[in-house]
Amino acid sequence: MTATNRLISFVRDYYQSNAFIPLHAPHFNGNEKHYVVDTLESTFVSSVGAYVDKFEQQVAEFTGAASAVATVNGTAALHTALYMAGVREGDFVITQPLTFVATCNVIAQLGAQPVFVDVERSTLGMSANKLESFLNEQCEQRDGQCYHHSGARIAAVVPMHTFGHPVRIDEIAQVCARFGITLVEDAAESLGSFYKNKHTGTFSDFAALSFNGNKIITTGGGGMVLCASEELAQKTKHITTTAKVPHPYEFYHDELAFNFRMPNLNAALGCGQIEQLIEYLAQKRGLAQAYQSELENTDLEFVSEPMDAQSNYWLNAVICRDKKHRDELLTQTNQAGVMTRPVWQLMHTLPMFQNAICGPLDVSIWLAERIVNLPSSVPVPKEAP
């Protein structure tokens, strides 16, 4: 039996289904329905309600962040995080080309420009060494800040914890500190992931989480800004709620701001989901271990969590021999009703970012030709006969 056929058979056996197997589907087996109905009955379904506050507290407590601010989606969370970090029009923001397009969209929407440095094969995320080399070769420090040779300020560095696998975030933070650059973590995919026993998203003043329908827990659509202090969180909450100054009836707004607040209805769903997060993490780790065992001694290399990290294994992945092997795997699995996907198109190859400044991107290009994501849903419990 070929490795691909073994993989298809394994996935069907694991999910106990001969029907279509999606890449990552949510399921709702806890208090979600109860909390959502409670919200409907309360009539507080929009951006004011008890579940928003509760969900923020639960996420902050789980991650160890000082505070958390809920937003309408992960893109809005990252947009807010970058804005709060001081990114403005004309700035450069360094990120990785192997990422979801939202990372770069929000940079551009703030009037800044993404700059790309390479990733590491071991983490799939930004290389601290490549970041440092880029800064040494193409940038200089003036007045405590870092500037590219073109004259643009390097306002922030945004690594992403790809598929939930933590980058070497402490080393990236050290590089940023040496060059006077603000660090913002794109932790959209990494709720439940830890690096050196510290949760991703808590190595910087601001970070973004996502609760999209395909994430480890979902609010339908939703995100969260993790903040390093309560003071920063209060400012962030003010910015995400149109900068409205509290008053019994007057509408007064004291600065330019966003309407990014998560609705109470979505937060209620999140409260039901997060109660099951520990169980989900254990099940996803078990699935990853099963994949790794099944694929030993095959021509598919399973992507394991990096050294010093505990990954949430949001999306499991394999590395194929080459692009031809990757395309064959994608074709055969999808034709068999087992959903697999390649990694995103590299950002610097997209039309809106093709003129971006880049360092050498050899590892990103190599990985993009070989990575395939595998079905990673938490299995739905089977009802007893």
Image: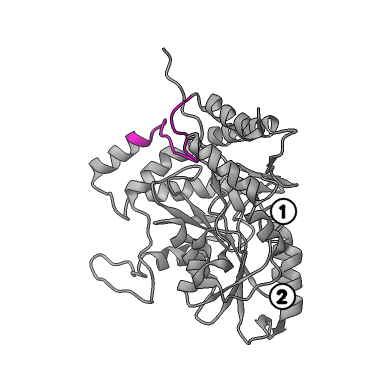
From the viewer's perspective, tell me whether residue 183 is left or right of residue 265.
Answer: right
| Residue nearest the observer in this picture, 330 or 104 | 330
- Magenta span contains residue 378: no
Provide the residue designation for mark 1.
121
From the viewer's perspective, tell me whether residue 69 is left or right of residue 196.
Answer: left
Residue 367 seen from this side = yes
At a point 69% along the width and 44% down the height, the residue shown is 305
Mark 1, secondary structure of its residue? loop
Q: Position of residue 382 (x, y in %)?
A: 45, 21
From the viewer's perspective, tell me whether residue 378 is left or right of residue 54.
Answer: right
Provide the residue designation for mark 2.
179
Mark 2, secondary structure of its residue? helix
* Secondary structure mostly seen in the magenta stretch: loop
- Magenta span contains residue 30: yes
Q: Amino acid at mark 1?
A: Arg
Q: Position of residue 316 (x, y in %)?
A: 60, 41
Q: Which residues are magenta?
A: 17-34
Q: Quick check: 376 above or below 112? A: above
At a point 41% along the width and 12% down the height, the residue shown is 385
Closest to the camera, between mark 2 and mark 1, is: 1
Q: Quadrant of residue 252?
A: bottom left
| Residue nearest the observer in this picture, 164 or 44 | 164
Q: Quadrant of residue 290?
A: top right
Residue 376 seen from this side = no
Q: Quick check: 323 above or below 310? A: below
| Residue nearest the observer in this picture, 44 or 93 | 93
Q: Amino acid at mark 2?
A: Phe
